[in-house]
Amino acid sequence: MSAMRSTVDAQPALLSIENIYLLIGFVVLFLVIKTLQDKRHPKRLTTALFWGLFGSVFLFGDLSLTYLGESLTYRWVGVFVILIAVLAGMGKVSMGHYDMPSEEEQTTSARKIGNKLFIPAVLIPIVTVICTIVLKDIQIGSLFVFDQSHVTLAALTLACTIALLVSWKFTGGSPVQALGESRRLVDSIGWAAILPQMLAMLGGVFIVANTGTAIQELVTLFVSPDNRFMLVVIYCVGMALFTMVMGNAFAAFPVMTAGIAVPFLIQGHGASAAPLVAIGMYSGYCGTLMTPMAANFNIVPAALLDLKDKYQVIKVQIPTALSLLAINILLMYGVIFND
Amino acid sequence: MSELNFLPLSGIVVVILGFALRFNPLLVVTCAGVVTGWAVGLDFLTILETFGEKFLNSRQLASFLLLLPVIAILERYGLQQHAKSWIASIKGATTARIMSVYFVVRECSAALGLINLAGQPQTVRPLLAPMALGAASNLHGDLPKPVKDLISAHAAACDNIAVFFGEDIFIAFGAVLLMDAFLRENGITGIEPLHIGLWAIPTAIAALIVHLFRLARLEAKIRAQVALHAEQSQSDAQSSAVREELA
């Protein structure tokens, strides 16, 4: 697929995608060191190993592609991924021990700093959008600041750096302290942080295995490829149903889009891709609202809120989900066709 | 038409079974990948290389890790406490109004990429549900358990719906990057994440309208349910009084 990437990839940039991956790698490496130093961590070594394996893919991935070649690199990354899954599957990844100030101390500091606490958080999206829209072409000499094929991500990286410096000024907490503090958040997200990437991977295997074609064949049994409206209905409802099965729209998206949207709507009827995928993904989210498979959103809160019926959150969400699914179908049918 | 080949769909069965049996999702997803590859006759090295290639090529999905240090340091210095006292200062609160305000703030902040600013454990349980329940009991007195559950479930739904339909507007969110990566992989070029984010806006507005309409009707539903339960407990009391007289 790399041959398809545009030639702008080659243009050197300060915030190139490789440098951003390296930065993420160093952040994870820092978290690993902090985990190893946490003597009261119940699963110190295995949690550190889990994040260490994950971080290595970022630190050494591009280096390995250059020096070991694609085949060998993909193999060791594949092995690491399986090890990561096994560690998580055996329950070897857990929360550690963190020194958080008491509720009163936080309230006192909140009162002292006031609304300035919101500023760094709000700066992140603002700076990202400004850089993406206005500053994306700026250069230092012949060096682009933002990776021209990953402008958004490069802008986000810059925005986070600026927000970090601003919060340093307002709170007095240094960036190194901030990195250490982020371990608390990363650990509370835990293995779920890696799930989107794993699901993208599963989607990749589905593509290689032609799962999309199997679904495509299933679909042709039910609908004529000339019926635009039914194709839109099948794609949107299919996204919702498949998301209900997978518990996650990310996993449903590559399969349903490769199986229905790309061959029938984009290639078959010239549908425009940006609204198609955006509304398609949102149709999947309608499914997320209606499934116990999306445990974090639908089942965990029922437990947190001490509800008698553990499906009540889902039941409350169904009317909104079905209305939005219908709206998505009409919206998609109305906007994707240009002729 | 040739005979249908269902073997590529075997991974889907693994996912359904794995989730139903409550295995760790990372393990379930990996197994589903291995089973799918094996079912269509790929050798193990090819499966391994596919895993590695896709995992490596979707590394941009982990970019949210760069946001966490900022949020973490702000939390340490009382971001959540400040947000609490800020929301508590909003006057004239009813259940529907509190949830509507929360919905709007949550959807807008998600659209700006502040997805981790709130959530089920961080804001719904300690903040939104108690405030909504408090407002309802101000109006109706002590609430029966089914009414309490209805309000709490709505609080949870509020957070989910607002964040889901807001987050895809933010161009650096994982879903948008995933869609972008998918289009690139499929050779569909010339689309920036910004385009995808813009096309998320109509559905986001529809979600806002639909759900605020439902919240507006929630107040009447609470009133009806409270009245119903009051009636029921009254007739229960009457019948037990009758029973006592008979005895």
Image: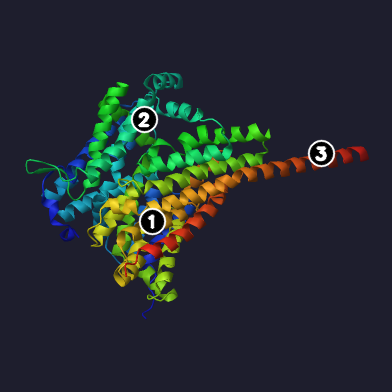
Lateral position of residue A310 relative to residue A69, left or right: right
Q: Chain of mark 2?
A: A
Assess whether mark 3 and mark 1 are in contact (beta carbons under 8 angstroms): no
Label 3 or label 2, whichever lies nearer to me, is 2
Q: Position of residue A1 (x, y in %)?
A: 20, 60
Q: Secondary structure at mark 2?
A: helix
Which numbered disc covers residue A118? 2
List the residue tagged with mark 1. A281
What amino acid is at disc 2?
A: Phe
For the view shown, which residue lies furthest in the left direction?
A: A141
Above/below status of A200 relative to A181: below
Task: Tell me the subunit letter for badge 3.
Answer: B
Q: Amino acid at mark 1?
A: Met
Where residue A271 sits: x, y (%)? 32, 66
Q: Give the residue drawn at x 28%, y 51%.
A: B193
What number is the disc on residue B237? 3
**Relative to A79, is B140 above or below?**
above
